Image (spheres, rainbow, N blue to C red):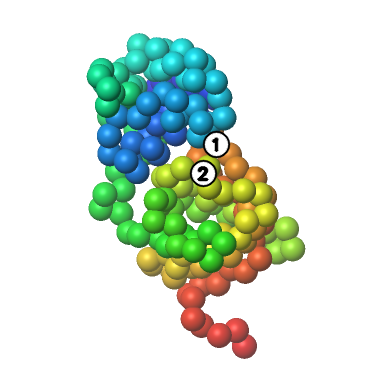
């Protein structure tokens, strides 16, 4: 558990920096982060100063400069190293999403099938997802669970999609009798 307390704004900006850095593997400009989190670039620059003071980001000078997350940033966001993790497929409106990885599936209300919801925590940007979009998660490696649902909302602080589940099966491919 991280001992660094971040404001929701700091957490959102830091999470987006991590997402963009993972996708592009280079320093990320404050303007790019601001565009993704729908904030003013000046606000992002101010937050980056406080994140630098907390040793969560480092500034990269020069024309190709910007910001990079430090190892402490991953700890503060409680992000595990997924380089060796199993791949859990994710599709968005029928198209595979290559730029995101499912980190966690939290079934929040399976005891009410007509209101079944799930929080899907991702490593990757949430910017391409909108309310009402269809998302398919899985099958997961061990249980072969597959979840199909519609996006009810986004929790940008935890980098998660909130789904209303339309269909959930495990193992995938087993016919219902």
Q: Is residue 69 above or below residue 132?
A: above
Which residue was labeled with disc 1? 156
> Relative to residue 105, is residue 66 depicted above or below?
above
Foreground pick, 131 / 26: 26
Instruction: Please tell me which of labels 1 and 2 falls first in the chain.
Output: 2
Kindly identify the residue that appears in the image at 53 percent across and 59 percent down: 92
Percent of width and height locating residue 11 = 48, 27
Residue 134 x, y percent position in the rendering: 61, 60
Tag 1 near tag 2, CB within 8 Å:
yes
Q: Identify the element where label 2 is drawn.
A: loop
Quadrant showing the N terminus? top left
Q: Farthest residue toward the bottom?
A: 177
Frontmost of labels 1 and 2 is 2
Answer few, some or many: residues within 10 Å of disc 2's Cα (few below 14, many 20 plus, some between 14 and 19): many
Q: Is residue 99 left or right of residue 107?
A: left
Residue 32 coordinates in the image, percent (x, y): 44, 30
Which residue, given by chain and number where applicable, does mark 2 sit on?
A: 126
């Amino acid at each position: 558990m991280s001992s660094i307390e971040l404001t929701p704004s700091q957490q959102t900006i830091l999470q987006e920096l991590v997402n963009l850095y993972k996708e592009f593997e280079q320093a990320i400009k404050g303007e790019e982060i601001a565009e993704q989190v729908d904030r003013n670039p000046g606000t992002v620059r101010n937050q980056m100063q406080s994140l630098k003071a907390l040793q969560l980001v480092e500034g990269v000078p020069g024309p190709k400069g910007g910001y990079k997350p430090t190892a402490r940033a991953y700890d503060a966001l409680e992000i595990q190293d997924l380089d060796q993790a199993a791949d859990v497929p994710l599709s968005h409106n029928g198209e595979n999403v290559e730029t995101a990885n499912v980190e966690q599936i939290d079934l929040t209300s399976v005891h009410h099938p007509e209101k079944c919801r799930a929080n899907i925590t991702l490593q990757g940007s949430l910017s391409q997802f909108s309310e009402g979009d269809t998302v398919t998660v899985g099958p997961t490696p061990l249980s072969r669970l597959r979840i199909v649902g519609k996006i009810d909302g986004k929790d940008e602080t935890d980098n998660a999609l909130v789904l209303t589940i339309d269909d959930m099966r495990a193992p995938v491919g087993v016919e219902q009798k």
